[in-house]
């Protein structure tokens, strides 16, 4: 396993549409997943998408443990999600602060669907199919956007609600 370099906004490959993964349960895929897990842990991220380490494949990981420092952040189970599909369950959207490991030190307010179903496969080919809400739904939408070459900055509606974490105070405590 190794910690991989995270690409920052400005790298053209972050804006590419990534390719589906077709082979599961292979040593190469296991290695990629393990590198992503290690990298996310090292960066203290809530999620990481393969394109962020320069691999344009449809693979994301995410997970947030309960953390007394961030009582408002709901725990999300550690998940490896490949070739994900998201459906919104209703049209309700909610604004919330987001950060991204590819845009370090910054935060912005982004609207996301509150209730979604997502499905896909894990690295062994097992089906994952969940209905989730709120913070969990936000993290999944943020990560899956990376697979379509979309960064959260492209979804900000009011650029006055985008800035440096240090200037904003204690807003939006996770990066993904
Ligand atoms: Ni991100």
Image: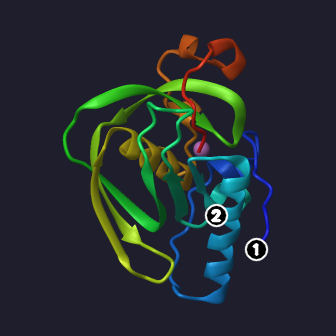
Characterize the local packing of mark 1: few (<14), some (14-19) or many (20 or more) Cα atoms within 10 angstroms. few
Q: Residue at 53% of width from left, 36% of height from top?
A: 68
Give the alpha-carbon distance from disc 2 to disc 1, as whole Å: 9 Å
| Above or below: residue 48 compared with residue 99 | below
CB-based contact (under 8 Å), mark 2 and mark 1: yes
Question: x%, y% of residue 41?
Answer: 67, 55
Q: How many numbered circles are shown? A: 2
Q: Residues within 10 Å of mark 2 (few under 14, many from 20)?
A: many
Task: Using the rendered view, name the quadrant where residue 57 is placed.
Answer: bottom right
Q: Residue at x 54, y 60 (%)?
A: 61
**From the viewer's perspective, is 136 left or right of 6?**
left
- Please tell me which residue lies in front, 148 or 78: 78
Q: Secondary structure at mark 2?
A: helix
Q: How is the image coloured?
A: rainbow
Task: Give the image quarter of residue 33.
Answer: bottom right
Q: Is residue 55 visible?
A: no
Dividing the image into four equal quarters, which quarter contains ligand 1? top right
The picture places residue 167, in percent across and down from the top left corner, at: 69, 12
Residue shown at 68% from the left, 43% from the top: 101
Quadrant including the C terminus: top right
Q: Tell me the tag on residue 37.
A: 2
Left or right of residue 146, residue 96 in this image: left
Label 2 or label 1, whichever comes before in sequence order: 1
**Which residue, given by chain and number where applicable, does mark 1 sit on?**
1
Query: Which image quarter holds the N terminus?
Result: bottom right
| Front-most of residues 9 and 47 | 47
For residue 31, which quarter of the picture?
bottom right
């Amino acid at each position: 396993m190794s910690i991989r370099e995270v690409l920052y906004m400005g790298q053209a490959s972050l804006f590419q549409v990534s390719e589906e993964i077709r082979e599961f349960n292979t040593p190469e895929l296991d290695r990629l997943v393990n590198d992503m897990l290690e990298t996310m842990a090292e960066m203290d991220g809530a999620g990481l998408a393969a394109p962020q380490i320069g691999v344009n494949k449809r693979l994301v990981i995410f997970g947030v443990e309960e953390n007394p420092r961030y009582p408002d952040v709901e725990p999300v189970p550690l998940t490896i999600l490949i070739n994900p599909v998201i459906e919104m369950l209703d049209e309700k959207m909610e604004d919330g602060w987001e950060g991204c490991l590819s845009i370090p030190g910054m935060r912005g307010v982004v609207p996301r669907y509150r209730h979604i179903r997502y499905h896909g496969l894990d690295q062994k080919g097992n089906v994952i199919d969940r209905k989730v809400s709120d913070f969990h739904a936000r993290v999944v939408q943020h990560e899956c956007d990376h697979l379509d070459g979309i960064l959260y900055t492209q979804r900000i509606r009011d650029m006055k609600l985008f800035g440096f974490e240090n200037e904003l105070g204690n807003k939006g405590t996770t990066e993904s």
